[in-house]
Image: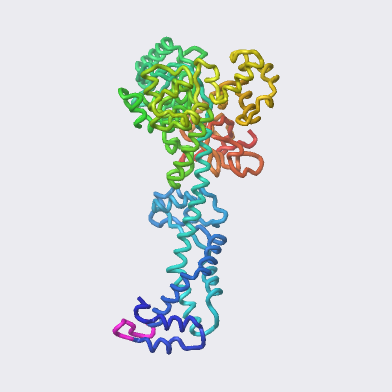
Amino acid sequence: MAKEKGLEPLAQAIFNQDNSNPEKLADSYLDEESGVNCIEDALAGARDIIAEWINEDAEIREAMRRLFRDKGIVNAKVIGTKREEASKYKDYFDYSEPVKTIPSHRLLAVRRGENEMMLSVKIAPPEEDCIALIERLTVKSNTASANEVKLAIKDCYKRLLGPSMETELRVLTKESADMEAIEVFADNVHNLLLAPPLGEKSIIAIDPGFRTGCKVASLDANGTFLEYNTIFPHGSDFRRQEAAEIIHTLVEKYNPFAIAVGNGTAGRETESWLRTLSLPASIKIISVSEAGASVYSASEVAIEEFPDQDVTVRGAISIGRRLQDPLSELVKIDPKAIGVGQYQHDVNQVALTAKLDDVVLSCVNSVGVELNTASAHLLQYVSGIGKTRAQSIVDHRMENGPFRSRESLKKVKGIGKKAFEQAAGFLRIRNGENPLDSSAVHPESYSVVQSILDDLNLSIEEIMQNENMLSSVRAEKYVTDVFGLPTINDILDELRKPGRDPRESFDAVNFDDSIQSIEDLQIDMVVPGIVTNVTNFGAFVDIGVHQDGLIHISQLANRFVKHPSEIVKVNQAVKVRIIDVDHKRKRISLSMKQV
């Protein structure tokens, strides 16, 4: 607008910063028709133009970027009227920390508080430093014109350059915090998906509850749903007796290896009640995380699997199956619903989804998939298969019976040569025509195994897991242009432990029966727990009281710890000491020092 009023020559004359009198210069630009009614109007318009020139100067912007990155400070204050409802952001009511040192989790917490309109946030260096920088690059003299330029600089910073630089810095720091949070989340999901499986054992699974009762699902060793019951072990004496009779009947009928109890509402109380029933000592009572079970039970995948059952039945089934095989069950749930990240709903969702998809693919392919029992949802994560081919495999299996060999996979619609090459090594067939089909040896390498068998004059059954014979094989002898020495060694390793599950063996965590709620906790108690989440600032641990405790990073070890993942991982069993209990805020502080 100032330019349209013809004030650009005046701005240039002032910006030259010579000994000219700005007011005298401005006097010749007065024009009532264009709206320049007085000298101050003319000078203000000229300063607006100078402010725009400064804002668009590449050298000044680059210098300001460096200043914002090097000396920027995150300042947060509670919005005056929100002090009560913003209590969860109490740590940030009057908070400041340099951009260069603020951890990603604190930055994301501050930004969430701002988005929820609980906190006001500014990210910038001290204003005087910014003004001084621009003046060093712009002011050339100590004249009256230079004073006008200084006024333009202050206006430029407050109105144009400062907000622009803050926006850039917010984007930059958000991207950095997002990537760090995504990496932490991905690492947690990886450890959760590769949690030790109980294996092919029959299960009675209980989704606990008080008022609505406990939902009980019986599953066979393959996870097949057998029977559903509702019991009320926390009701009247009659209801408790009735519940006990149902559990005894199910135990006698299905001879379960374990009873899986969800760790949500009424979980610990249900475990304690089960231990009063004089069940066979061989039956293990195991607490299982319910995280994401409700999401699964209402999902399209659950409806496809159990169209005739309601959400409560599906939830109980999911609890039992995730004990048998966490990977096979958890891949059905959006990883973001599992709850093992930090601010996962605040980060870049496209980047998060892509990273988590990579993690799931990696986990599924590192473990391998049983071709004759895997669901379409699990099969779709096998390299080279995808959603459409996975469904085709399941349809083919239902029409023609179980696959007898990997080769028969080629008969499935949509499985061409390339897809077979990509997928075959990750698929397993137990008790198939070729014992190698149960291993991670790819069919294209079967000829190498056959050469070894011919030289030793042995059958495949005689050499598998035969360490003495395998250690006598000279791997160099079988190297070709196609199969290098590392591949031959991998094949021999696989023959030593064919189809070996890379996951650790299952070991149940038994919580302290004397602790049922947060009220039972006392300072310096040492209790068992299981890590449920790892973040940049520490690890959350389930100790069996419906409220996870936090081991702050400073309490993980008697040494400096750069990141909690150096010490703990999701699903790890730990012993912890109670160091503080805040009943009002329901916060439990834990330590692994001197335990």
Q: Position of residue 329 (x, y in %)?
A: 44, 27
The region drawn magenta spans 31-41
Taking the image as shown, residue 38 lies to the left or right of residue 19, namely left
In the image, residue 412 lies in the stretch drawn in magenta: no
* Residue positioned 46% across, 17% down in the render: 404
Q: Nearer the viewer, residue 66 or 289?
A: 66
Query: 505 above or below 13?
Result: above
Quarter of the N terminus within the rendering: bottom left
Way the structure is coloured: rainbow
Which quadrant would residue 558 be assigned to in this image? top right
In front of the other: 454 or 56: 454
Q: Is residue 335 above or below residue 230?
A: below
Tell me: 419 left or right of 476. Answer: left
Q: Residue furthest front?
A: 481
Q: In the rendered view, tell whether residue 7 sits above or below residue 263.
A: below
Question: Which residue is at the far left?
Answer: 33
Can see residue 142? Answer: yes
Task: State the image quarter where residue 481 is shown.
Answer: top right
Q: Is residue 36 magenta?
A: yes
Count of marks placed on residues = 0
Q: Judge whether residue 505 can be spotted in this image.
A: no
The x and y percentages for residue 218 are 40, 17
Counting from the top left corner in percent of width and height, residue 229 is at 35, 18
Q: In this orientation, which residue lies closer to the viewer: 480 or 275? A: 480
- In the rendered image, which quarter contains the C terminus? top right
- Residue 238 percent coordinates (x, y): 35, 16
| Residue shown at the point (45%, 71%) measured from the top left | 156
> What residue is at 45 percent from the left and 73 percent from the top?
53
